[in-house]
Image: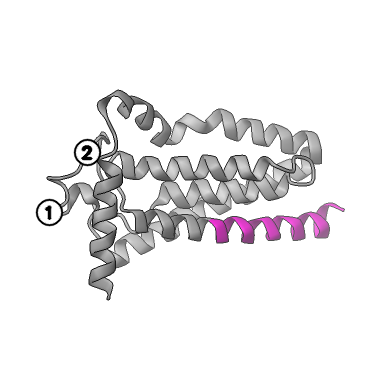
Amino acid sequence: MIDQLLELDRELFLYLNNLGSETWDGLWLIITNKLTFIPLYALLLYFIYKKYGLRPLLLMILVISVMITFTDQITNVFKDGFMRARPCRADGVSDLARFVAERCGKYGFFSGHSSNSMAAAVFGGLILRPYFKNLIFILLFWSFIVAYSRIYVGVHYPLDIICGMTFGALSGFMFYKLTKYLIKRYLN
């Protein structure tokens, strides 16, 4: 059963990865770069400041820092625990895939980009939901694009992405609830 699932994962990866073309490679490398979305994060922090004020913003910056550290470190625990080779390093896959990324880590289960972007999307969307009702849908779409970029550049399988996004969504929700509690307890 697991072997069949992993084979299906490999096949889906190869299909999705090979949809790419050199024309779009540069765009997907920009999307997959962690620094690309700093302006988006700054805009979200600005919205939080305008809607909540300085003290809640400072608290949220602390919580967001802990959230990203948490998702990133748990991702590393899973990668080191499962030791699933990334597609760019896997026999029978690397020679059939389009490898666009500038570098490729050793293990890939599950995707840190996917978990971090989804955690940020869920957290930011829920925090700002009373003021920007549809923002969460935009942020979720952004997270899906970031996640797909990891398949496009050849460094993650679809299951890496799905599990990363699931973990990120749960983390984002958990830290959103923590933030609401901390604001209610210490700032009101």
Q: At which x and y percent is residue 24?
A: 33, 27
The image quadrant of residue 22 is top left
Residue 158 or residue 42, whichever sits in front: 158
Q: At which x and y percent is residue 23?
A: 29, 23
Residue 83 in magenta stretch: no
Residue matched to label 1:
92
Q: Quadrant of the N terminus?
A: bottom left
Q: Is residue 171 left or right of residue 177?
A: left
Amino acid on which disc 2 is placed: Phe
Residue 85 can be seen in this image: yes
Q: Is residue 104 left or right of residue 49?
A: left
Amino acid on which disc 1 is placed: Gly
Disc 2 crowd, CA 10 A, few/some/many (<14, 14-19, 20+)? many
The residue stretch that appears in magenta: 169-188
Residue matched to label 2:
99
Rendered position, 114 above or below 77:
above
The image quadrant of residue 147 is top left
Q: Residue at x 62, y 31 (%)?
A: 42
Label 2 residue SS: loop
